[in-house]
């Protein structure tokens, strides 16, 4: 879903202590360059908060008059 000028949101879920693979490290900047938000989350709560914040981007922009 497009929000706040972005085309969409990608959430990469990882277990505590897990690191991004070389391929993930390489692809994330390319995805961002295409106008997407990329976040790495380690818990459901982090992912939920990122999703709620992302979905609220348009409302936040309207509130400040953009």
Image: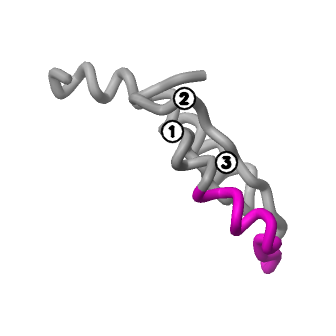
Measuring 67% from the left and 59% from the top, which residue is drawn there? 40
Helix, strand or loop under label 2: loop
Quadrant location of the C terminus? top left
Report which residue position mark 1 lands on.
Answer: 35
Residue 26 inside the magenta-drawn segment: yes
Determine if the magenta segment contains residue 53: no
Identify the magenta region: 17-29
Q: Residue 60, which numbered label?
A: none
> In the image, 40: left or right of 19?
left
From the image, tell me which residue sits under label 3: 47
Callout 3 secondary element: helix
Q: Quadrant of the N terminus?
A: top right
Q: CA distance from mark 1 to mark 2?
A: 6 Å
SS assignment at label 1: loop
Q: Which mark is residue 7?
A: 2
Residue 26 locus on image (x, y percent) = 70, 66
């Amino acid at each position: 879903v497009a929000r706040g000028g972005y085309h969409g949101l990608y959430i990469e879920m990882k277990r505590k202590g897990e690191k991004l693979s070389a391929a993930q490290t390489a692809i994330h900047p390319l995805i961002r360059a295409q106008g997407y938000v990329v976040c790495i989350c380690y818990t459901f709560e982090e992912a939920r908060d990122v999703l709620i914040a992302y979905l609220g981007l348009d409302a936040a922009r309207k509130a400040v008059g953009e």
